[in-house]
Image (spheres, helix red, strand yellow):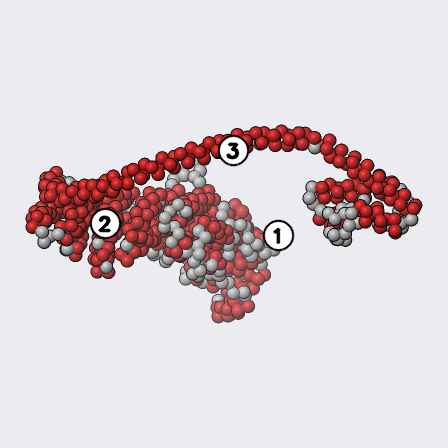
Amino acid sequence: MEAAAGPGPGLGASPEEPEAPERRRKAHGMLKLYYGLPEAESAASGVPPDPRDPTDLNGAHFDPEVFLDKLRKECPLAQLMDSETDMVRQIRALDSDMQTLVYENYNKFICATDTIRKMKNDFRKMEDEMDRLAATMAVITDFSARISATLQDRHERITKLAGVHALLRKLQFLFELPSRLTKCVELGAYGQAVRYQGRARAVLQQYQHLPSFRAIQDDCQLITARLAQQLRQKFRDGGAGAPELAECVELLLALGEPAEELCDEFLAHARGRLEGKLGGLEAELGPSPPAPDVLEFTDRGGSGFVSGLCQVVASYQELFSAQGPAGVEKLVAFARELGGRYFALVERRLAQEQGSGDNSLLVRALDRFHRRLRAPGTMLPAAGLTEGATEIVERAARERLGQHLQGLCAAFSGCLTDVRQALAAPRLAGKEGPGLGELLASVSGAILGHIKASLAAVHLFTAKDVSFSNKAYFRGEFCSQGVREGLIVGFIRSMCQTASGFCDSPGEKGGATPPALLLLLSRLCLDYETSTISYILTLTDEQFLGQDHSPVTPVSTLCAEARETARRLLTHYVKVQGLVVSQMLRKSVETRDWLTTLEPRNVRAVMKRVVEDTTAIDVQVGLLYEEGVRKAQSSDSSKRTFSVYSSSRQQGRYAPSYTPSAPMDTNLLSNIQKLFSERIDVFSPVEFNKVSVLTGIIKISLKTLLECVRLRTFGRYGLQQVQVDCHFLQLYLWRFVADEELVHLLLDEVVASAALRCLDPVPMEPSVVEVICERG
């Protein structure tokens, strides 16, 4: 309709399709205007209309005459006709929209109409009821006013009579007070008697100048004095419990007894009762009756002594709060003394918990002990009961860690004893005992199992449901310094020290140690250095995440200690096995008469035994250690070895000895050769492989043989026997060492030394030596 309000270029020239949205928008604007929303139209047009414009079809001041005059003046006839057509079309569209709106909301209009009709009926009934109610209230108000006017005089008289009655009842209570007090004392109702006395005390004090009230007051004072005496007697008897004791003190205070004296008597009586409970606990720790388990002991102490102490503290604070700091100091000294005695008994009982078994019972007992003491500690912080309980728990945890460390060391010693027994057990025919590999796996698994069991046991101290686990000690120092350093690192170092103890001198501990045990321990320490130490410490750090920043032992340091222990054990194993073989060789050289011996026909049995023992050692070491690296070996070691003794090199060495005119030349030639030969380090460091171990044993054995030969004097056949024995050793020993030239040199030195110590140095033919060795 606004389009018809003013002229516009091209009015009526637009088709129907573009005008449809505009028409709908205007229709909606009219509906909003109808429902009191005129601002929507102004917001849609973008230009705020003048509310007083008489030509505004949507305005409240619209004037049809002014609007028509404006159209006639401003618009030509054709535009007027178009405006009329457009207006008729908009009116029809508006009617159609209104009709559609009515049709769409017909049900709502019907319901609204019915609701309005019902509301009219209901309000009409309500108005009638309100009118009746107003009339009734007016009648009631009239009757109430007349009744109040009628009873005004009687009400004043009733009030006076009620006051007189109350006064008479008070006087009657005062006159009956002595008899009531006497009856209460006879019946033992001390509390009721004190309440009666308290109600009448102020009145009797106020009117004590009157003779009658003075007599009542005197009688009451006599009765209350007797009552106070009975209460004191009951207080001193000691048969009453803490609640009865507190009631007696409260009644005595109400009767006006001196508070300081009652305070001392209260603490003395409480001391007697609590000392009795402590005596019962101490009797349980005696040597004759069996002591109860630690959980039962702490339960009895908590339910007996600690509960009694809590009642005493609570009653004292309630009764003697007016005593000030002096009274508090008495209570603190009282609680501190008895608490210290209780702590001493608990520590005595905890000291009886020996062994590294299950910690669950001990932890539960410590948890209940700590929980029970939190209540008196909170009520009386100055006594330091909570701190004392925490210190006892911490000491118990430290002692338990020490016991677990001892248990781990004992378990390790037990494993070594089992290994000794297994190694010393006789081997039955057809039944072999466990090998070194099985024994090593058994020992390693057993030790690791004990370590895990100990970690699980001490982990109970840090469980979340334990009352003391949130203390600073258990969140920091216990995890890092206690468990990691004290238990795990301490055990690993103790294990290394115990293993190193087997490396003592042969006259001490090491002499009785089986060589196989040394070999097994060296491999165990090497495995710990390789992986086990890192695994155990990682497991410990994961289970005990402490907040302590104290320095701890690095994994590398422990691994270095374990490797050094393994090296010492393996070196000692080489020395022990070399000593065993050396003893055989030394006795075989010292017990034989080399000057008068017969011409050799075979290899001596001791040389065969040396080869057999060396082969057994090779098998034994191969069970635990890898082969190792060897130098490139000759394809014909036997011939090479033989050439050392019988070829041109040997002939050059022995030829001067055949002529008695040149003994000094022989010594000189031997010494010159030693200068140019490679020096052999007999006790060189041993590596962790089989070849290195066997090389060390063979070097010690052959060096012993060399030194023994240098101390003997040989005849011709003695020299030939040494030649045969050395060739036999060369045939078999070269395959055990890292460098076969080492065996060549040492055996060459043995034969050369025998030739130098020989009175008739005539060597045996090489072919004969070979035949004898092959036959042997």
Report x, y in % for residue 704: 44, 58
Closest to the observer, 181 or 175: 175
Q: N-terminal of the two: label 2 or label 3?
A: 3
Q: Residues within 10 Å of mark 2 (few under 14, many from 20)?
A: many
Check disc 3 and report its element: helix, strand or loop. helix
Q: Are marks 1 and 2 in contact (CB under 8 Å)?
A: no
Q: N-terminal of the two: label 3 or label 1?
A: 3
Asked if residue 579 shows in the view, the reply is no
In this rendering, position of residue 76 left or right of residue 42 = right
Amino acid identity at mark 2:
Ser
Amino acid identity at mark 3:
Glu
Closest to the observer, 529 or 50: 50
Can you say which quadrant of the picture contains the N terminus?
top right
Mark 1, mark 2: which one is toward the viewer?
2
* Count of residue discs: 3
Check disc 1 and report its element: helix, strand or loop. loop
Closest to the observer, 400 or 747: 400
The residue that disc 3 covers is 127
The residue that disc 1 covers is 635
Q: Label 2 to label 3, Cα distance in Å?
A: 68 Å
The residue that disc 2 covers is 315
Q: Label 1 to label 2, Cα distance in Å?
A: 102 Å
